[in-house]
Amino acid sequence: MNENVKHQDEEALNDGSTAYTIISWIFGLAFFAIGIVNTFWGGDTGFGIFIVLLSFVYFLPVNDILYKVTGFTLPKLRLLKILLGIFIVWAAMGVGELFDKIEIMVNSF
């Protein structure tokens, strides 16, 4: 018998991974945009590139890549992503003066 056949009476289980992936991509896009703004406007090229590189943590399957390269994974990756997100927002808003750079960007168009 084919065990992969879905029946009408069965309900699909949602473990939350789809929602987690969507949320991760949204934050990844936001942090990527913050990095681009910092790279090209306001004179913080190095900081902007650093933020762009950190944003890839939200796009890529980090644990899978890390396991293939090093042989171990990061436990509690969701917690690490949350802490990294807090750091990026703090660095961009406070230290990086993001709103001033967005104003420079808008005025340049």
Image (tube, helix red, strand yellow):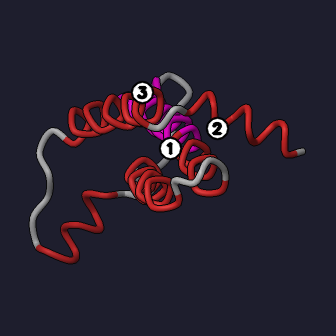
Q: Is residue 22 magenta?
A: yes
| Mark 1 surroundings within 10 Å by alpha-carbon count, few (fewer than 14), some (14 through 19), many (20 or more) | many
Per the image, label 2 sits on a secondary structure element best described as: helix
Asked if residue 47 is positioned above or below residue 83 in the image, the reply reads: below
Please say whether residue 70 is visible from this viewpoint: yes
The residue that mark 1 highlights is 28
Nearer to me, 5 or 69: 69
First in sequence: mark 3 vs mark 2: 3
Picture coordinates of residue 89, whole percent (x, y): 42, 30
Of the 4 image quadrants, the one containing the C terminus is top right
Per the image, label 3 sits on a secondary structure element best described as: helix
| Mark 3 surroundings within 10 Å by alpha-carbon count, few (fewer than 14), some (14 through 19), many (20 or more) | few
The residue that mark 2 highlights is 101
In this picture, residue 64 sits left or right of residue 20: left
Residue at 25%, 32% (x, y): give it.
83
Q: Give, as a single range, the part of the protein colored magenta.
A: 11-30
Outermost residue to the bottom: 69
